[in-house]
Image (cartoon, rainbow, N blue to C red):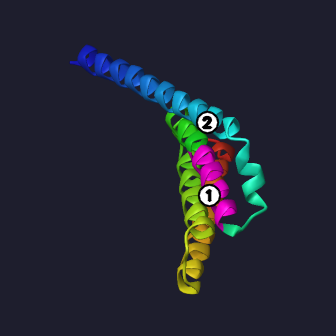
């Protein structure tokens, strides 16, 4: 039974690696398509819609990178960072009401507090001597 569990864990690690590689390929393709389009820099000066599209593309790449980190080294820190970027992207790129912006700010604040609490808890565990 133990060997079966070890085999399943190895298969899961391999599948995680494959998914991480696919996400990395997607990020590279997104970056290449982003830099291939030089016209976007001229469009940025034309209005806020082009700038929002620019930010949206940048946020997608950043979230992809954070997601890759989360797949490669799963930890509560990486998961919280991905969620913070997702909430920030929604708040900045989408057309939101002031109430939605307020809820987003509160959400990010709570996530930062949770992250700090997790760091303190981990520090307390490392400092205790048995």
Residue 86 percent coordinates (x, y): 54, 58
Q: Is residue 70 rendered to the left or right of residue 112?
A: left
Q: Give the residue displayed 46% in from the left and 23% down from the top.
A: 17
Q: Give the residue displayed 59% in from the left and 61% down from the top.
A: 89
Image quadrant where one finds the C terminus: top right
Residue 50 percent coordinates (x, y): 66, 60
Q: CA distance from mark 1 to mark 2?
A: 14 Å
Give the mark, 1 or 2, whose residue is nearer the N terminus. Answer: 2
Helix, strand or loop for disc 2: helix
Which residue occupies the foreground of this view, 52 or 116? 52
23 to 124, vertically: above or below: above
Which residue occupies the foreground of this view, 84 or 127? 84
Residue 94 percent coordinates (x, y): 55, 69
Other-residue count near label 2 (Cα within 10 Å), few / some / many at <14 / 14–19 / ≥20: few
Splitting the image into 4 quarters, where does residue 6 fall?
top left
Which label sits on residue 3? none
Q: Give the residue displayed 55% in from the left and 34% down from the top.
A: 73
Q: Which residues are magenta?
A: 49-63
Which label sits on residue 33? 2
Residue 63 percent coordinates (x, y): 58, 47
Image quadrant where one finds the N terminus: top left
110 to 74, vertically: above or below: below
Splitting the image into 4 quarters, where does residue 30 fall?
top right
Residue 13 within the magenta-colored segment of the rendering: no
118 to 9, vertically: above or below: below
Which label sits on residue 53? 1
Helix, strand or loop for disc 1: helix
Q: Give the residue displayed 53% in from the left and 42% down from the top.
A: 67
Q: Is residue 42 rendered to the left or right of residue 34?
A: right
Q: Is residue 82 rendered to the left or right of residue 51?
A: left
């Amino acid at each position: 039974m133990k060997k079966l569990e070890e085999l399943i864990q190895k298969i899961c690690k391999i599948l995680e690696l494959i998914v991480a590689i696919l996400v990395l390929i997607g990020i590279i393709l997104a970056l290449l398509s982003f830099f291939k389009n030089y016209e976007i820099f001229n469009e940025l000066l034309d209005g806020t819609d082009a700038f929002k599209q620019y930010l949206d593309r940048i946020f997608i790449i950043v979230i992809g990178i954070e997601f890759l980190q989360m797949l490669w080294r799963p930890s509560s820190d990486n998961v919280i960072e991905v969620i913070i970027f997702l909430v920030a992207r929604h708040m900045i790129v989408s057309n939101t009401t002031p109430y939605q912006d307020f809820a987003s700010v509160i959400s990010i604040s709570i996530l930062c507090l949770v992250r700090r609490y997790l760091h303190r808890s981990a520090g307390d565990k490392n400092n205790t001597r048995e």
